[in-house]
Amino acid sequence: MYKRQETRDKRQGEVVILGAGMAGLSTAYHLQNNYSLYEKEAEPGGMARTIDKDGYRFDYDGHLLHFRDEYAFSLISDLLDGNLAPHKRNSWIYSKGSYTRYPFQANFYGLPKDVIKECLVGLIRARLNLVNVYGKRDLNGNFDNWIRMTFGEGIAEHFMLSYNKKFWTVEPKELVCDWLDGFVPVPAIEDVVTGAISSSTKPYGYNSRFWYPVKGGISEVVDGFLQKTSNLHVNKKVVTIDQHRKEIVFEDGTIKGFKHLVSTIPLPELWKILVNIPDKVKEAFSRLRHTSIFVVNLGIKRDDVTDRHWVYYPEESIAFYRTGFPTNFSMDVAPSNRTSLYAEISYSDNKKIDKEKAIRDTVRDLKLLGIICREDEIEVCQPIDIKYGYVIYDSNRKSAVQTIKNYLQRFGIHTIGRYGSWSYMSMEDVILEGREMARCLLTS
Ligand SMILES: Cc1cc2nc3c(=O)[nH]c(=O)nc-3n(C[C@H](O)[C@H](O)[C@H](O)COP(=O)(O)OP(=O)(O)OC[C@H]3O[C@@H](n4cnc5c(N)ncnc54)[C@H](O)[C@@H]3O)c2cc1C
């Protein structure tokens, strides 16, 4: 039980928002007034922050803007006031000693001939075995089955299963498919054949185009929100939420009452600060699983490293699952004649990491791949450890999240955002969720 302090604020009419990441900022922006926004860190932005180091600007991890929604596009364009440039994706996969274009399932050109044959034959067999396969998802089945049914054995074995195991840190058969929506493109067979006999540049998937600020890093979007919101309190870590009393206690001892509380705090962290939770809800919290991401950001004293935006690496022998090159998103993120790059490594309870070794292995593999030359100077190394990376979509997730949300809603607590909704959400998704949250509160 927390110790009561005298600094209390019992104004219960306003909405209390916890966490000034994109979800919290968007909720505040759309409420317009009668809210207070609290953030535990010294600066807002959450996952969408940018670190300045020795002339480089490193986002927490590659953070690109993809738009499926017109409102989100116009809002962010407005917040950035012209400081936004479109890019056509130039992304690749490195496997079996060669580079092919992303997505693998539509671009075998350049792979060894026997691999191309296995992938094509597997795909044709899969399509023949299935009625009405285009875009159909076996949403009740597991991800491993879905991959084999949709793409066939060749694509499954040569890319999909190994990449996804490396990325999710668990076997694809442990995953369900309700996160797939648009994330894994399913090409038509004609396009697959074109991509097997030529280097096809046909755009696929939700991220075939992206936008990025011309000046500054992704935190420019955060700054845009800050221009149009108020009542933000930083260095205000919530240490207890007494849902029964409808009171929040901050680390500095102050207490605040609430009627409606919007929390974007990751659910496993929320579990630690709620009081007297029923066993059924505790059990639901205990079933949540996630990956963490260790990001090795490097500043290289050379400017012609690559014109690629990012590259995927399905093979376990390579330390990272993806590299990205922010100086190809914007020249403004590094001093002139320099390259900024990041390498991402997944880990979890299922797959441990030695972070010092991960940095050494990353540099070793970048050199082996010829991305960094022996004579290149690495002038900056800025590792960033992201505790909550991706939610693991196993068969427990959906019901566990529902149980938690239903319980908290009884006390006027709404959990939103990527880690409050415990789902695979982009910046656009959480911004829209914040708008919807504000709408519900304004009409309640
Ligand atoms: C590796 C990686 C790459 C990604 N790449 C992209 C991309 O390219 N494009 C894209 O659109 N999206 C990307 N995303 C997703 C994007 O980062 C998120 O959707 C979005 O930033 C989440 O915002 P949020 O507000 O929901 O959560 P967060 O950003 O996590 O915000 C939650 C906030 O709550 C605060 N908080 C936590 N505990 C407390 C407490 N006790 N008291 C007070 N405050 C607290 C935190 O400090 C934080 O500021 C990526 C995510 C990851 C992990």
Image: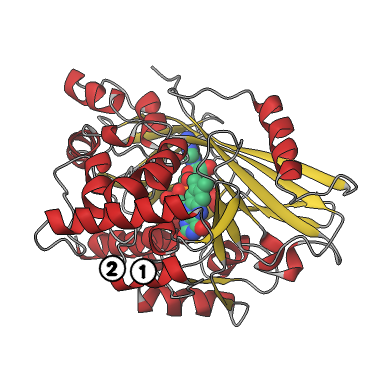
Total residue callouts: 2
Q: Disc 1 to disc 2, how far (Cα)?
A: 6 Å
Judging by the rendered image, the residue that carries numbered circle 1 is: 193
Q: Residue 379: x, y in percent?
A: 86, 47
Q: Quadrant of the N terminus?
A: top left
Specify the farthest residue to the left: 131
At x 43% / y 50%, what residue is drawn?
115
Judge left or right: residue 304 versus residue 232: right
Judging by the rendered image, the residue that carries numbered circle 2 is: 189
Q: Quadrant of the C terminus?
A: bottom left
Residue 317's image quarter?
top right
Secondary structure beneath label 2: helix
> Disc 1 vs disc 2: Cβ atoms closer than 8 Å?
yes
Asked whether residue 365 is in view, the answer is yes
Specify the farthest residue to the bottom: 82
At x 39% / y 64%, what residue is drawn?
106
Residue 104's image quarter?
bottom left
Give the colouring mode of the picture: secondary structure
Q: Vertically, is 17 above or below 124?
A: above
Graded by Cα atoms within 10 Å as few (under 14), some (14 to 19) or many (20 or more), the crowding at tag 2 reads some
Depth check: 60 or 219 in front?
60
Q: Vertically, is 426 above or below 372?
A: below
Task: Give, as a three-letter code, the residue at label 1.
Answer: Val
Task: Give, as a three-letter code, the residue at label 2.
Answer: Ile
Q: Residue 134: x, y in percent?
A: 19, 65
Depth check: 116 or 324 in front?
116
**Is disc 2's CB within 8 Å of ligand 1?**
no
Depth check: 44 or 386 in front?
386
At x 66% / y 62%, what residue is drawn?
217
Judge left or right: residue 340 versus residue 111: right
Q: Residue 331: x, y in percent?
A: 75, 70
Secondary structure beneath label 1: helix
